[in-house]
Amino acid sequence: MKRIILLAIFGFASISTFSVEKNTCVKTQITVTQEEYKELPVDKLPTAVKEAVKKDFEGAVITKAYVNEDKEYKLELQLETVTQTVFIDANGYWLEKE
């Protein structure tokens, strides 16, 4: 009976040593592409952009304007004490950016 118990203990111990997982470290590199916007004078904005702001953000003032290669505009709007950043294309259509 002692032999059976000892065999069971040694058998279990040898099986459990093989089932131990080895922790490995995997390095992951994340590349973030940021669209390049260049500052643009507010008076150089297309009429469609100015009209869209006037229509959809009544009373807001465009404090800063930026443009990228795709003619997408990033605008900083000031409405009373609130500053908001919005994105719009050259035709006056709003874009959703995160």
Image (spheres, rainbow, N blue to C red):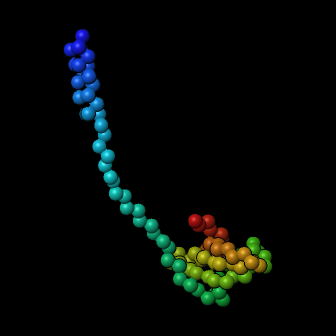
What residue lies at 72% left-to-right and 75% top-to-bottom? Answer: 82
19 with respect to 73 (left or right) = left
Write the residue at 58% across / 81% down.
66
Callout count = 0
Which quarter of the rendered picture does the C terminus lie within? bottom right
Residue 57 in sight: yes
Residue 25 location, x and y as percent?
Answer: 32, 52
Using the image, determine if residue 72 lies above or below residue 10. Answer: below
Work out whether residue 84 or residue 9 is closer to the camera in this orientation and state it: 9
- Could you say which quadrant of the image residue 12 lies in? top left
Along the horizontal axis of the image, is 76 left or right of 39?
right
| Farthest residue, direction front | 2
Q: Quadrant of residue 84?
A: bottom right
Residue most extreme to the right? 59
Front one among 64 and 5: 5
Q: Relative to the observer, which residue lies in front, 78 or 68?
A: 78
Percent position (x, y) of residue 68?
A: 53, 78
Above-or-below relation of 3 to 78: above
Quarter of the image that includes the N terminus:
top left
Can residue 48 be seen here? The reply is no
Horizontal and vertical percent position of residue 86: 64, 72
| Residue 16 placement, left or right of 34 | left
Quadrant hosting residue 85: bottom right
Residue 2 spot, x, y in % from top left: 23, 14
Query: In front here: 44 or 9?
Result: 9
Residue under the image location 58 percent in, 86 percent down: 40
Residue 32 higher or lower than 11, as above or below: below
